[in-house]
Image (tube, rainbow, N blue to C red):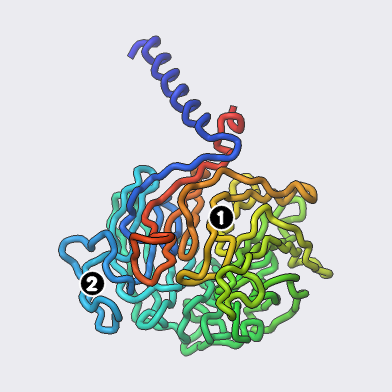
Amino acid sequence: MNIMAKVVTVLVFLQAMVSQLRAVDAQGSWQIIQPNAGISCMHAAVTHFDTIIMLDRTNTGPTQIKLPGGQCRKQRLERVLKRDCWAHSVMMDPVNGAVRPLFVFTDTWCSSGQFFDNGVMVQTGGDFEGFRKIRTLAPCAADGNCDWVELEELLAKGRWYSSNQLLQSGIRQIIVGGRNEPTYEFYPKRFAGEGAFPLAVLNGCCDNLYPFVYLLPNGDLWIFANQDSVTLNWNTGKVIRTYPKIPGNPRNYPSAGSAAMLPLSYTTGFGTAEILVCGGAATGASQSSDVSAPASKNCGRIVATDGNAFWAMEDMPFQRIMGDMLNMPNGEVIIINGAANGFQGWGMAGNPVLNPVMYNPGAGDGNRFTVLAETVIPRMYHSTASLLSDGRVVVAGSNTHQFYTLTGDFPTEFRVEAYSPPYLGAKKVF
């Protein structure tokens, strides 16, 4: 290739790159990257290959993608299809939108999961026959054939609506809470025959499922349920600190607020940990089945490592339940998906919130939130948001119905979108 041809090639490449960057405006932009993923994505996780593991319940009945090679799941405890030839999990390549069906044997409805430091996904619990199950998936590249493996080992307790947190060793997780299960346990076990351990902050009837769990810089755990939070020394099993109750409404399932630990900073030696908790259903809405109750629009921020920790409160631009919060590459936090009324459950929410917002933890009072470009696709119950290595956010799922329903209000959603935040725009690069 002569020098002129090389120059032309470079210029064409740069023109294409600039053109793509300028498509991202000041509020970001949306793109559908897969019109039908085959399943409605209830859980999602991005692997170190930048592929996306997507999971739904197994008791939905037929999905829109079959298992390969005539394979069928024959699960005698399954309550919908005893012989099920449909996939309920897929692996997605966000580069081209391609999906590959995965085989999951027991019900993953409202299960939980976390990666080990070697990239292996550990997925625990679920409903009915999946209640005490442990599943793993060792990820592979987009053209690989990795799949779910269900272990013979069982959890000490049934875990439905639990939360998993990787511990500092990178090879052990703690699994916290669950419906009617105010305990925690470890995987793998620390010693043979180890069971579960009680945790009082998980007690009570309501709004304490899918607790928020974060590993603090000193190795302790910050655990939040309903409106209460504690620090747990998981090595000794002792609760070493109780925090003030967050003002306002309950924040956990089915009241469905969201939370994120803010980025640790070198300026404090990575020793100061702040947690942001936002939104959720109105107090009592889930107990009274008030689907029209306005969701909360307030956020609380607490320095969990501060000796005199307190909740600093401020309002979001929108009221929101069932939002997803992600730490972004620029140190900010995106709050995306959800609804403005009701609470979490089948048909229990309305008025979808279509605009994400970006939270800048370093900005001053009244200037932390920025409203971003809206999507046209409601994402409410059982929807997901995942950050890719290229800075985009992949948004999938939303099924407010017990089974896949293609008509009426808020039909089951199979489309997958990618949201490009403003930092991917031309002005941020050039």
**Which quarter shows the C terminus?**
top right
Instruction: Specify few, some or many for label 1: CA neighbours under 10 Å numbering under 14, 14-19, or 20 or more.
Output: many
Amino acid type for the residue under numbered disc 2: Asp
Q: Position of residue 318 (x, y in %)?
A: 65, 55
Residue assigned mark 2: 84
Does residue 213 show up?
Answer: no
Residue assigned mark 1: 353
Between residue 215 and residue 275, name the one nearer to us: 275
Quarter occupied by residue 106: bottom left
Quarter occupied by residue 289: bottom right
In this rendering, the label closer to the viewer, 2 or 1? 1
Between residue 24 and residue 295, name the one nearer to us: 295
Instruction: Specify few, some or many for label 2: CA neighbours under 10 Å numbering under 14, 14-19, or 20 or more.
Output: many
Residue 94: mark in rendering: none
Q: Position of residue 114 (x, y in %)?
A: 49, 66
Q: Position of residue 74 (x, y in %)?
A: 22, 77
Does residue 404 show up?
Answer: yes
Q: Is residue 286 above or below residue 358?
A: below
Tag count: 2
Query: Is 414 placed left or right of 387 in the picture?
Result: left
Query: Is 56 placed left or right of 101 in the picture?
Result: right
Q: Is residue 57 above or below residue 45?
A: below
For the point 59% across and 80% down, the residue is 287
For the point 61% across and 69% down, the residue is 293
Between residue 213 and residue 215, name the one nearer to us: 213
Q: Secondary structure at mark 2?
A: strand
Query: Is 84 placed left or right of 401 in the picture?
Result: left
Quarter occupied by residue 181: bottom right
Q: Is residue 259 above or below residue 130?
A: above
Amino acid type for the residue under numbered disc 1: Val
**Residue at mark 2 to residue at mark 1: CA–CA distance:** 35 Å
